[in-house]
Amino acid sequence: MVFWLYVLTRVDVSRAYPFVGLGFIGTMLFAHFFLQEPITIQKLAGTLLIVSGVVLLAR
């Protein structure tokens, strides 16, 4: 949370907020590597949609 507040003091919210979606990707990777949860086609498709959205909004 402290890091997020620091980022918000340096970057516009409209530019920083799309990167919150990257947390979903981190959660999926954490679950896969540490909890041995499988990565399915649906999860990969959702991840690609999130990344696409972040790229579009970050432009």
Image (cartoon, grey):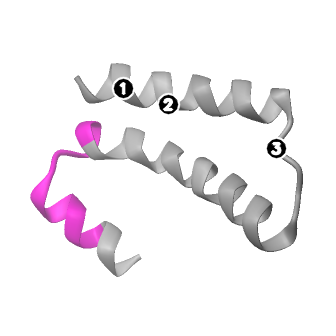
Q: Which residues are magenta?
A: 5-15
Picture disc at residue 6 = none
Q: Quadrant of residue 49?
A: top right
Q: Which residue is mark 3?
A: 39
How dense is the environment of label 3, judged by Cα within 10 Å: few (below 14), some, or many (20 and up)? Answer: few
Name the quarter where the N terminus is drawn.
Answer: bottom left
The residue located at (49%, 31%) in the rendering is: 51
Q: Position of residue 58 (x, y in %)?
A: 28, 30
The residue located at (40%, 38%) in the rendering is: 18
Dot 2 or dot 3, earlier in sequence: 3
Q: Main secondary structure of the magenta part?
A: helix
Circle 1: residue type: Val
Real-space Cα separation, disc 2 to disc 3, in angstroms? 16 Å
Q: Position of residue 48 (x, y in %)?
A: 59, 26
* Circle 1 SS class: helix
Please tell me whether residue 49 is drawn above or below residue 27 in the rendered image. above
Circle 2: residue type: Val
Closer to the eye: label 3 or 1: 3
* Circle 2 SS class: helix
Closer to the eye: label 2 or 3: 3
Q: Nearer the viewer, residue 30 or 7?
A: 30
Q: Which residue is mark 2?
A: 51
How dense is the environment of label 1, judged by Cα within 10 Å: few (below 14), some, or many (20 and up)? Answer: few
Q: Are marks 2 and 1 in contact (CB under 8 Å)?
A: yes
* Circle 3 SS class: loop
Q: Quadrant of residue 57?
A: top left
Q: Which residue is mark 1?
A: 55
